[in-house]
Image: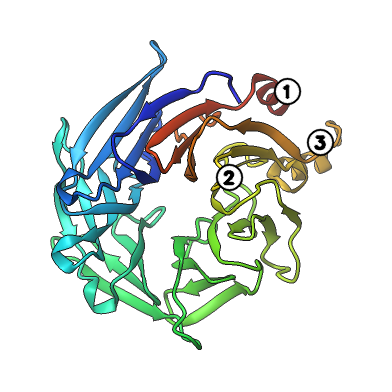
Amino acid sequence: MSNNPLIYGVEFQARSLCSLLADNDQDCFLIGTQSLVTSNNQVHLVKLQEDTNTLCPQIYEHSCGEIWSLASSPTDKHLISTCYASIERDCEKCTALWRLPEDDGHLENVITFPSEKYGTDVKVTTFHPTNDAYMCSVIDNNIVMWDVGESEVKIVCTAVLDGKGQPRFTTGKWNPQNVNLQFVTADDCNIKAWDLRTQTKIAWSLDGVHTQVIRDFDFNPNRQYYMATCGDDGYSKFWDIRNPRQPLISRADHSHWIWSLRYNPVHDELIGTASSDGQVLITCLAGISSSAVEIEDIKTKPSIEDKIVATCDQHEDSVYCVEWSSANSWILASLSYDGRLLLNKVPKDEQLRILL
């Protein structure tokens, strides 16, 4: 990657990062802190000022607890959700919807979700990609779909993960490739897609696809049925969900657990990964990208070898998150546990290869 990444340091430990999805004009990222002193926790909105090439923060107080995950609305740049450990509930994980004020200060609470009846460990609360009214939480072995379109939050439907040994979800997200209410989860070494219109029906699954716990997954934004998974076995795997028996590609580029994996939102041959080995990688997998379909059709470009095109080793701790900018698809942000945010750009020669 670029030799001189932009660096922003947070005073406290942190492990949650997201792009401000609804802002397509400026590179903006949100960080949630994990201070042991509950009243000290914050959400940092970090903006890239292109004219000066500097990072400028706005800081909001999140005094209700340590932030374990956060998400931004794809349609309203002032709305975010957090999942946090609440001291008021003996460090049980809770979740809330917030509004970002115009200036620094306290986040404005919109909704505190009534999650306690479903469990004590809220992993994520995510926004539906197109319907402003719908959100979904992963809580222990439950999926809870909320309607936040009116003044009071309503429960639309729920689904439960059954099995031996009290299985629990590790994460979940909406399937952006499916226009219906399809929510996808990871539990242990498995991926399941739930049709929330029927509450308990599993639309499809990838079972036993890693040898250790799956930490993250993502969908190719431009090629239907294609997705990627990563986990504690150090592998990133790429799938066509219509053929779940074996991955299209399996890579072991990291030397430790892979915590986060993201497809580039525009150039889906580029995938960012973050690991406990302290490294962030950008890998080019042109052979299974949407551009491969175009190349096959028009027969103009030579085939491109799958390879690592950039390595970021400037982190000094485990890297828990990577996120592409929603405003500039060449910028990749990464966050390590020591609170260090790095912004790197895809190398110029790789940009030119993709564009030409």
The percent coordinates of residue 103 (x first, y second) are 15, 30
User: Closer to the camera, 170 or 328?
Assistant: 170
Residue located beneath label 1 in the image: 356
Badge 2 amino acid: Asp
Q: Residue furthest top?
A: 52
Disc 1 packing (10 Å; few <14; some 14–19; many ≥20): few
Viewer-nearest residue: 43 or 101: 43
Name which residue type carries label 3. Answer: Ile
Relative to 80, 332 lies left or right? right
Outermost residue on the bottom side: it is: 164
What secondary structure is marked by label 3?
loop
Assign the C terminus to one quadrant of the image.
top right
Q: Amino acid at mark 1?
A: Leu
Q: Secondary structure at mark 2?
A: loop
Q: CA distance from mark 3 to mark 1?
A: 13 Å
Say which label, 3 or 1, has the lower sequence index: 3
Residue 304 — which label? Answer: 3
Residue 96 in the image: above or below residue 318: below
Sequence-wise, which precedes: disc 1 or disc 2? 2
Q: Which label sits on residue 71?
A: none
Residue ID at (29%, 76%): 119
**Pointer 2 with pointer 3, Cβ within 8 A:** no
Disc nearest the viewer among 3 and 1: 3
Name the spot of residue 280 as percent of width and height, x first. 57, 38
The quadrant where residue 235 appears: bottom right
Q: Residue at x 48, y 40 (%)?
A: 317
Q: Secondary structure at mark 1?
A: loop
**Cα distance between the residues tagged 2 and 3:** 28 Å
N-terminal-most mark, 2 or 3: 2
Colour mode of the rendering: rainbow
Drawn side of residue 195 relative to residue 296, left or right: left
